[in-house]
Image: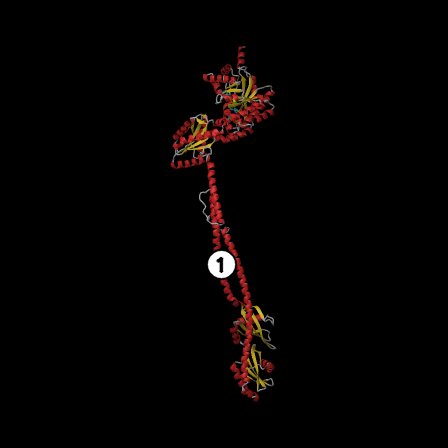
Amino acid sequence: MRFHSLESRIVTLFLILILTVQLAGFVATRVGIDDNARALISEELAVGERVFDRLLEQNAQKLAQGAQLLAKDYGFMSAIGANDRETLVSALSNHGARIGATHTAMVGIDRKIGAMTAGLSSSLEQSILQLVDKADQFGSATGVGIVNNLPYQIVMVPVKAPVTIGWVAMTFPIDQRLAKDMQALSSLQVSILTRGKSGTWVSGASTLPRPAASNLASRLQDIPDGISFLPKLMVSNDEVSARIIRLARDADNTTIVVLQRAIDEAIAPYRRLQLTLLILTGLGILVTVAISAFTAKRITGPLRDLSETAKRLGAGNYDEAIQIQSQRDDEIGELSKAFEVMRKDIANREVEIRKLAYRDPLTELPNRAQFSIYLNEAIEQSKAQNRSCHVLMMDLDRFKNVNDVLGHLFGDALLRQVAERLKAQVQDNNGMVARLGGDEFAVLLSNCHGNEARAVAARILKSLEQPISLEDQTVDLGAGIGIAGFPDHGPDAETLLSHAEVAMYVAKKSGNDAVVYEAMFDKGSQQSLSLLSELRSAIDKNEFRLYVQPKLSLDSGKVIGLEALVRWVHPENGMTFPDDFIPFSEQTGFIRTLTRWVLEQSTILCHDLASRDVHLKISVNISARDLLDQDLPAKFSEILARHQVAPSSFCLEITESAIMDDPVRAQNTLEGLHALGLELSIDDFGTGYSSLAYLKRLPVDELKIDKSFVMNMEKDADDAKIVRSTIDLGHNLGLRVVAEGIESEAAWNLLMKMGCDQGQGYFMSKPMPSDQLLGWIEQWRPPQELRRMENI
Ligand code: C2E
Ligand code: MG
Ligand code: MG
C-alpha cells in the first residue's frame, strides 16, 4: 500500500479520527478520575477525622467508666476520707492497670493531687488539675496533655460520698496503638506529631515507616498553623493528601494528628480501569484499521483495477471486456459500466480507424501503410526460412489523361477494375495486391523467386492489354512494372519499395513493360539530395550561365532569333549540360526557380541587344512543371514590364510531352501566355504522342522538328520523309516550321528545299555564352553568301 494511495489516505483518516476520539475520551476520563479521586480522598480524610474523634471519645468513655468504678469504690472513698495514702495509691494503680491507664491520680477537694501512681510528670499534673473545674461543672471531663512529646488522653470523674470529696484522673497514651487502630478503621496513614519549644515537629507515633514519618515532620515545617487540609503534599516521593487535626496545646507544646492518604493509592483502582480502557482503545484502533482497510480496499480495489484497465486501453488493448464490479449498483459500478461502454466505443472506432488507416476506400485494397506491414512480415518470414520474396510496383500509363478527359468518376471505376484484374492475376501465387496511391499499385509475392515474379508481372501486363470498357467507353491501358526482391535488392521494406519504384520509372521511361531493379538505376537518386541543395545554392552563387544558339532564316541566312539554353558551371564538375540537371529540377520543382532566372536573364539580354539595335526574337524553354503554374503569365509579364521589353520579342518552347501530361491545364496557361502577346512553339515535335486535334486547338505559332530526325535526314530516307511531312503539316496548320540539329550545309539546303522556314544547329553555331553573340553575328556568313562570294 503506497502512502499517497487513496487506500492509505482513507485508513489514515479513520485512524486519526479514532485516535482523536479515543485520546479525548482517555484524557477526559483521566482528569475525571483524578478529580474524583482527590474529592474522594478529601472526603475520606474528613471522615477519618470524625472517626478519630470518635475513637478518642470511645477511649475517653472507657477510661471514664474505669475511673467511675474506682470513684464509686467504697474502700477508695474511705481511704480518701481517712487520707490513707497507701491504700489510695494501691487502689489507683490497681484500677489504672486494669483498664490500661498509664497514670492514675486522685485530686483532693483542695484541688491538689492527693495521691498518684508513680511517674506522673509535673506537666501532666498541670493538665490534670486544669480539668477539675470542668469535671466539677459537668460531672466528668476529658482532655489531652503532653508529656515528652507524647500526647495523653486524660479523664476525670468526681468521687461522691455523696458530696464530692475528690476527683479521680486517669491518663491514656495516644500512641502507636491508637494510630494502628485508627488505620485499621479508616485505612488512612496516621501520624502523631508534637512541636515543642524548639519549634520543630517530632513524630511521636506513626503508621508510616520511620523515614516517611520523619519526612512528613520536616514537610510540615513550612506549613503555617491553622491549615487543616493539605490537598497535595510530597512525602517520601509519594503524593499525598493530608488532614491536620489539632490535638493538644499547652504553653510549650502543640500536638497534632496527621491523617494522610497517598493519591496514587486512591487512584490505583481507577488506573486498572484506565488500563482496561487503554486496551479497549487499542482493540478499537485495530478494528478500525481493519475495517477502514477493508472499506478502502472495497473502494480502491476496483478503482485500481479500472486504472489498470485504463492503462490497457491506453496501450491499445481494447479486446478484453471489463468485468470489474459492474454488478455493483454504486458509483464504482456506474464507473465500471461507463468504462465498458467507452471500451466498446473505442474498440469500434479503432476498427474503423484501422480500416481507414490501412484500407484504400476506393478499391478496398490494403493501402501503402498496410502493404509495408505485410511486406515487413514477408521479409521476416523469408529471413527465417532462407527464401526470397518480391514486390511488383505498377503505375498505369496515361491515367491522368483518362481522369481529365473522362472524369474522376470514370477514373475511379477504372481503378476498381484494374484492382480486380490484378487480384485475379496474383491469386494463384498467393500474391497480395495493394493500392499505394493514385494509379500506383503494388503486389507482394511472398515466398517466390525472381522468375516467378517476372512471370506474374508479364501476366499482369497481358491482362491490362485487354481494353477496359466502362459506360460505353473503351480505354486502352498500359503500365510499367518495377520488380525488387528480398534479399537481392534490399534488406527491408522501405528499401525494397523504393527500389521497385526506381525500377518502375525505368520501365516507364525505357518503354519496357517490366524491369527488375538494378543497382545502377539508383546512382542518380543517391546523389539527388545533395544535388537539390547544390542547385538551390547555385543561383545565389551565380553558377548558372545563359548560353544562346542563333536561329536563322534558311532562305536569307539571316539571324532572326536565338534560343536561350542554360548551363551550370558546377564548382567541382565544371560545365554541366541541361540534360544532367533539368529532369531532376523538374522532378523536384526547382525548375520554376530556374525558369524564372532564365526569363530574367533573357529579358536583360533582349533589352541589351535592342539598345544596340539588334532585334532578335528570343526563344525560352518552358517545362511541364512550369505549365502547371497558373501564375506563370503574371510572373512573366512582370519581368517583361520591369525591363521594358515587349512580349512579342519572346517565344516560349514547350515540348510535346509537357503539353500531353496535363493538356487541359497546359492549354489554360498557354492561352494566358499567348494573350500576353508571347509566341509559342512546340519543341521536339515528333517525339511525343500529341493528338493533332489537340494541337489544332492550342494557340501555337511554331513547330520545332526534333533534331533526331533532322540530323539523320540526309542518310535516312524515312527521317527525311518525316521532316518533309512535318513541315507540310506545320504549314497546313498555319504554323512556322523550325528545324533544329542542322549539322551540315547539305541539311540546310535540303531543309530549305523542303520549305522549312528557320533552322538552328551546330553547322551555324553551337550554343555560346550570350556575351559572345554579337561577335559571332559580326563574323557570320550564310552559305549562300559564301557561295556567292566564291562565285565572284
Ligand atoms: P532543346 O530545347 O530541344 O534545345 C536544343 C538542344 O539541341 C540544345 O541542347 C542544343 O545544344 C542542341 N543542339 C542544337 N543544335 C544541335 C546540333 O546541330 N546537333 C546536336 N547534336 N545538338 C544540337 P542543350 O543545350 O544541351 O539542351 C538540351 C535540352 O535541355 C533542351 O532541348 C531543353 O529541352 C532543355 N533546356 C535547355 N535549357 C533549358 C532551360 O533554360 N529551361 C528548360 N526548361 N529546359 C532547358
Ligand atoms: Mg528548345
Ligand atoms: Mg528541341
Q: Is residue 666 visible?
A: yes
- In this rendering, is residue 569 above or below 785? below
Above or below, 788 against 23 in this view is above
Q: Nearer the viewer, residue 591 or 336?
A: 336
**Residue at point 50%, 62% (across, down):** 277
| Rendering coords of residue 233 (x, y %) | 56, 68
Indicate the amino acid at tag 1.
Gly
Residue 369 position in % (x across, y down)? 46, 35
In-image side of 132 versus 332 (left or right)? right
Among the 4 quarters of the image, the one containing residue 475: top left
In the rendered image, is residue 236 in sight? no
Residue 11 location (% of width, % of height): 50, 54
Q: Secondary structure at mark 1?
A: helix
Relative to 93, say whether 190 is above or below.
above
Give the vertical position of 711 relative to 419 (above or below): above
Foreground: 336 or 523? Answer: 336
Place residue 260 in its image quadrant.
bottom right
* Residue furthest top in the image: 792
Q: Quadrant of the C terminus?
A: top right
Q: Nearer the viewer, residue 788 or 162?
A: 162
Q: Quadrant of residue 513?
A: top left
Q: Which residue is mark 1?
A: 284
Residue 769 position, x and y percent, is: 55, 22
